[in-house]
Amino acid sequence: MEAENLTLAEAEAQQSRNAIRSIKVALLLSRLKPSSGDRRLTAAADRRDAATEEKEEELKREIGDLKMEVVRERLRNKRIRLCGLMEVFLEVAVLFVACGFLFAIAVGN
């Protein structure tokens, strides 16, 4: 029972970390979108220098890394759920075998 509570706590912590990562990704994406005020800028002011482009590329790389991390975490969570389900099935199977064994002993006497 303690292991179940521990895994539930871990799952909740993982969900909160995933939510924080998703918020970070959303904020980074919103920074990349041009605002309506940017459209009114003149052509000379609209030119981006190398530093701005470098920052955008860095943000895009960071967004890609965060997306890959979120995908890894989802796969890890699915794997954990599958292992837990298999553990329950094995416990039930062992219980049935033990009951059958005890029944065979009782009927044999």
Image (tube, rainbow, N blue to C red):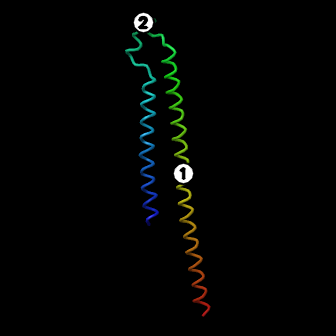
Residue lying furthest front in this view?
Answer: 51
Q: Amino acid at mark 1?
A: Lys
> Dividing the picture into quarters, in which one does residue 109 lie?
bottom right
Say left or right for 15 vs 69: left
Which comes before the other along the chain, label 2 or label 1? Answer: 2
| Residue 105: percent from left, percent from top | 60, 88
Q: Which mark is residue 42?
A: 2
Estimate the spatial distance between the alpha carbons at disc 2 and disc 1, rounded to whole Å.
51 Å
Residue in front for this viewpoint, 80 or 47: 47
Q: Quadrant of residue 102?
A: bottom right
| Depth order, front residue of 26/106 | 26
Q: Which residue is mark 1?
A: 78
> Vertically, is 103 above or below 35?
below
Residue at point 44% right, 59% down?
Answer: 6
Q: Indicate the quadrant where residue 18 lies.
A: top left
10 Å crowding of disc 1: few (<14), some (14-19), many (20+): few
Q: Residue at x 53, y 24 (%)?
A: 57
Percent from the top left, x then y, of residue 97?
60, 77
Residue lying at the far left in this picture: please name it: 37
Query: Of circles 2 and 1, which is in front?
Result: 2
Give the side of residue 39 with respect to residue 97, left or right: left
